Image (spheres, coloured by chain):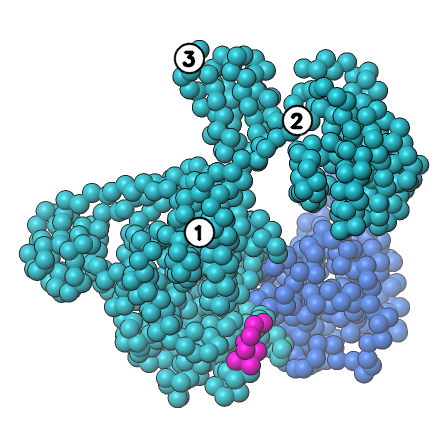
């Protein structure tokens, strides 16, 4: 499992990339979450994972006090993604209570941010907000996840965050369209303003934007290592 | 003042509480040099027997006539030292306490030298004040040896019986047509399985036949004025349209009555007539006509009940009647209502017919209930085979409702209901969705064990997330995370029972205004001290018992009712109440009867009266709390608060500022 707080499931990985079969297999695996204990590890917790400051840190980053959670499971029951992930809302809040901060950085947990858990929580915790706080904490401590860097860089270069897949490009050409939507001419001025905004607010530094050249180099290096899955 | 006073000063170490910070011997040494101080001593514990004996000894030896005790807050030991002074022949109101603990050592623990200096100043101020105190005498006033008990559930019934057994007259009122309260609605009681009405009904009958108890049902409390020992009470007897004296309870009227409406006593699960008794064991067995649903009151026709009544008890012209009483004490036992799970789209109550509350199930499973003890699905009248209970509905919720508290009884009554279902129907399955099980009480954990093992009730740890109905079968599906399995499940049930919690009964807020007592944030009536004065309210002479004070089970309710009865009788047994003399008094030579004092007084103590010299304000001592509001407001400075006169306070302030404050003695 990859590092970084990737709020996406293995199941959602684009099936059109080279290792399509492998991704499909991963997706199938993720559809049947493992029963039993939450964290399947080949070692026991030693307490090193424990961060006694985590609860307070979540509050500092805008979350509520998770200590009052009764572990009733109502959040999990109403969660729209709970059936698709082994990491249930209630489990994640329990991890917060225990202060297992670093576990959050190493598992592909997910929150859609729908706030249904907040609507139902009898302890008046807002798990969705807690997860936003944890994302903030993770970015502060481990840096910005790669996919965000990529997407924001793409927005600045192309005016949109996602590049259409090869299938879609072919389909567009078949329909007599340009393979890529030509957003650039119309929005060139806006993109310039966006760039200024990013620079003035130092958002570019925070995210660590990469040029096309840099992105290409990085990808090549990663492919050479075989790190891309 | 003829001779100069002889003041004794006693500085308390209070162990290390004061002595650890303030140099007490130095303070005593300093005090002995002050004007009129005959003797000054430092003691380890002035409140101990040894400390008290020391005061007595010094009073005798030095002929002391005024005492300053420099120790803790007067809230703690002022009564102690007043008693010591009184026993030694000194007027108890010539004792003044200087607070060296809360107001000095505890707040200045970091600076011993300054704390000692401040202690000296405080003692000097106290000595200045005690010099100006005047001897006062507490008045004893007679009490009315009668108690008003509001609410005739098990708490009110028990308190009334206990009081009557001690020879104290009781007026027991209830706004329902029958006594019995919530307990009468229940089937069995946990954990013993006693039939509720079987143990309650004899008590209800006893109330009817006890000479000292005057029972007024269908009656509301409208006004309670006066003070401990002497309350004036106004009650309203609602129009019952049936003469209680004549009615023999034969039921001929009800049989003929053509109107059918949901019976409140059966939580709407069954019907009653417009003229009715709520349940067969009702006491008194007197019929009540519900004018809202009666055809005669709507159209002027019908009148069948009046025609068939063999004793002519039905009286359509009856009007509400006012009853005025004098009582010495009041016991509030107004009980609880069950929470109504009204949130649409959550648990499906009142949306899906097969979702009912626990109290509704109590009525179904009760042999005297609308189905004669048959548990049926409201949708089709069949016997359910799969029943689920949902715990903590309207309790322990910091969000959707404001009921943050645990209602205490739901875990236990669910065990009881689940076990009863299992006993009645061998092939029934019962599942309980819970967050925590709280079985703390005598025999409760053993009962839980039994319910799980012998009765085979299934416990599922998780709060239901969604409740849905199959539109064809009317079966109910509960989706929940079973937290101990880490699995989300959807299970189907024939009947879902919501274990609803307790909320203050409907009239609580109105009664709070009538009685002038306080409520805690949960809405229930507030006791003065959670541990040491659990049945007393902030208004002397008014006591609380049962679920009016907070959720509790029957044993706790009965214990509390007995405690309230005991507290009330202890107050009345003495025959008198002591009225503190620290009250406001009007100088009638100065008063111009402007009436401002009447307006500002929160207790209704001042009145404008006619005197030989014209109109004057006069303060009823027994009503006065000595708060001083009137004294501060009086534009003519005609009102003085005894024990807090301008002279007494100014002398103290003068000392604080070395006589430079410029206080002119006003």
Name the one closer to the observer, B133 or B626: B133
Earlier-in-chain disc, 3 versus 2: 2
Q: Residue furthest left?
A: B307
Q: Residues within 10 Å of mark 1 (few under 14, many from 20)?
A: many
Q: Residue at x 50, y 73 (%)?
A: B412
Tell whether position B443 is magenta.
Answer: yes
Identify the hue of chain B.
cyan
Q: At numbered mark 3, what does the secondary structure look like: helix, strand or loop? A: loop
* Mark 2 lies on residue: B134
Mark 2 vs mark 1: give the one in front: 2
In the picture, the quarter occupied by the N terminus of chain B is: top right
* Mark 1 lies on residue: B332
- Report x, y in % for residue A137: 79, 57
Name the one closer to the observer, A20 or B83: B83
Tell whether position B542 is magenta.
Answer: no
Mark 1 vs mark 3: give the one in front: 3
From the viewer's perspective, tell me whether residue B442 is left or right of residue A146: left
Q: Chain of mark 2?
A: B
Rounded to the nearest angstrom, the CA distance separating label 2 from label 1 is: 39 Å
* Mark 3 lies on residue: B612
Q: Residue at x 55, y 23 (%)?
A: B585
Q: Which stretch is magenta? A: B440-448
The quarter of the picture where residue B108 lies is top right
Q: Residue at x 75, y 21 (%)?
A: B3
Q: Is residue B606 above or below residue B550?
A: above
Q: Is residue B485 above or below residue B4?
A: below
Rounded to the nearest angstrom, the CA distance separating label 3 from label 2 is: 29 Å
Proximity of marks 3 and 2: CB atoms separated by less than 8 Å: no
- Report x, y in % for residue B570: 50, 52
Q: Chain of mark 3?
A: B
Q: At numbered mark 1, what does the secondary structure look like: helix, strand or loop? A: strand
């Amino acid at each position: 499992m990859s590092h970084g707080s990737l709020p996406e499931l293995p199941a959602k990985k684009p099936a059109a990339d080279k290792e399509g079969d492998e991704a499909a297999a991963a997706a199938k695996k993720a559809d049947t979450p493992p029963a039993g204990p939450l964290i399947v590890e080949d070692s026991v917790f030693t307490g090193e994972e424990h961060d006694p400051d985590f609860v307070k840190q979540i509050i500092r980053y805008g979350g509520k006090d998770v200590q009052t959670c009764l572990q009733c499971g109502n959040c999990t029951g109403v969660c729209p993604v709970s059936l698709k992930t082994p990491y249930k809302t209630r489990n994640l809040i329990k991890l917060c209570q225990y202060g297992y901060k670093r576990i959050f950085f190493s598992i592909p947990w997910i929150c859609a941010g729908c706030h249904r858990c907040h609507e139902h929580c009898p302890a008046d915790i807002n798990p969705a907000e807690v997860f936003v706080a944890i994302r903030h904490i993770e970015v502060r401590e481990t840096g910005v996840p790669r996919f965000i860097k990529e997407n924001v860089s793409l927005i600045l270069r192309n005016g949109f965050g996602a590049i259409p897949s090869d299938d879609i490009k072919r389909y567009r050409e078949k329909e007599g369209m340009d393979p890529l939507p030509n957003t650039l001419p119309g929005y060139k001025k806006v993109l310039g303003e966006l760039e200024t905004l990013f620079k003035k607010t130092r958002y570019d530094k925070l995210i660590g934007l990469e040029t096309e050249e840099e992105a290409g180099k990085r990808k090549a290096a990663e492919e050479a290592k075989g790190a891309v899955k | 003042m003829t001779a100069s006073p002889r003041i004794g000063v006693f500085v308390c170490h209070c162990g290390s509480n004061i002595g650890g910070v303030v140099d007490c011997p130095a303070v005593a040494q300093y005090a002995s040099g002050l004007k009129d101080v005959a003797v000054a001593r430092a003691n380890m514990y002035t409140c101990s027997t040894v400390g008290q004996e020391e005061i007595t000894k010094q009073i005798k030896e030095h002929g002391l006539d005024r005492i300053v005790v420099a120790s803790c807050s007067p809230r703690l030991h002022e009564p102690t030292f007043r008693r010591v002074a009184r026993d030694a022949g000194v007027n108890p109101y010539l004792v003044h306490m200087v607070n060296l603990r809360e107001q000095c050592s505890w707040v200045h623990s970091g600076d011993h030298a300054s704390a000692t200096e401040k202690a000296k100043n405080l003692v000097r101020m106290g000595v200045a004040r005690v010099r100006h105190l005047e001897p006062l005498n507490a008045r004893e006033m007679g009490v009315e040896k009668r108690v008003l008990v509001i609410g005739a559930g098990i708490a009110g019934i028990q308190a009334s019986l206990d009081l009557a057994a001690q020879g104290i007259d009781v007026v027991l009122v209830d706004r329902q047509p029958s006594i019995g309260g919530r307990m009468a609605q229940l089937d069995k009681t946990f954990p013993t399985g006693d039939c509720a009405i079987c143990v309650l009904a004899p008590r209800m009958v006893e109330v009817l036949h006890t000479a000292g108890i005057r029972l007024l049902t269908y009656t509301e409390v409208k006004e309670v004025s006066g003070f401990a020992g002497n309350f004036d009470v106004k009650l309203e007897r609602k129009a019952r349209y049936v003469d209680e004296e004549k009615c023999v309870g034969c039921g001929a009227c009800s049989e003929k009555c053509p109107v059918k409406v949901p019976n409140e006593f059966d939580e709407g699960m069954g019907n009653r007539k417009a003229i009715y008794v709520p349940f067969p064991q009702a006491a008194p067995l007197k019929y009540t006509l519900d004018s809202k649903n009666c055809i005669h009151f709507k159209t002027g026709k019908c009148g069948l009940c009046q025609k068939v009544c063999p004793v002519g008890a039905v009286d359509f012209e009856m009007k509400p009647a006012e009853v005025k009483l004098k009582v010495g004490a009041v016991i509030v036992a107004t009980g609880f209502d069950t929470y109504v799970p009204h949130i649409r789209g959550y648990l499906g109550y009142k949306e899906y017919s097969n979702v009912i509350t626990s109290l509704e199930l109590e009525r179904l499973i009760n042999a005297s209930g609308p189905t004669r003890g048959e548990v049926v699905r409201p949708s089709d009248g069949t016997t359910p085979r799969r029943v689920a209970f949902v715990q903590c509905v309207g309790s322990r919720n910091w969000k959707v409702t404001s009921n943050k508290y645990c209602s205490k009884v739901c875990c236990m009554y669910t065990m009881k209901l689940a076990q009863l279902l299992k006993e009645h129907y061998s092939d029934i399955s019962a599942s309980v969705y819970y967050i925590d099980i709280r079985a703390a009480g005598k025999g409760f954990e053993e009962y839980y064990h039994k319910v799980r093992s012998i009765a085979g009730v299934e416990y599922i740890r998780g709060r239901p997330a969604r409740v849905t109905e199959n539109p064809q079968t009317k079966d109910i599906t509960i989706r929940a995370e079973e937290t101990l399995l880490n699995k989300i499940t959807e299970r189907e049930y024939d009947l879902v029972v919501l274990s609803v919690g307790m909320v203050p009964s409907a009239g609580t807020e109105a009664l709070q205004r009538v009685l002038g007592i306080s409520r805690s944030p949960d809405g229930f009536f507030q006791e003065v001290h959670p541990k040491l004065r659990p049945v007393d309210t902030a208004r002397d002479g008014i006591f609380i018992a049962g679920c009016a004070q907070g959720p509790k089970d029957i044993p706790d309710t009965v214990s509390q009712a007995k405690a309230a009865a005991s507290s009330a009788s202890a107050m009345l047994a003495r025959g008198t109440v002591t009225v503190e003399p620290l009250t406001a008094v009007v100088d009638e030579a100065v008063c111009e009867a402007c009436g401002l004092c009447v307006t500002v007084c929160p207790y209704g103590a001042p009145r404008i009266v006619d005197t030989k010299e014209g109109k004057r304000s006069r303060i009823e001592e027994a009503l006065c709390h000595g708060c001083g509001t009137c004294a501060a407001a009086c534009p003519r400075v005609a009102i003085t608060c005894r024990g807090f006169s301008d002279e007494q306070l100014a002398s103290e302030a003068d000392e604080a500022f070395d006589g430079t404050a410029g206080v002119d003695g006003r």
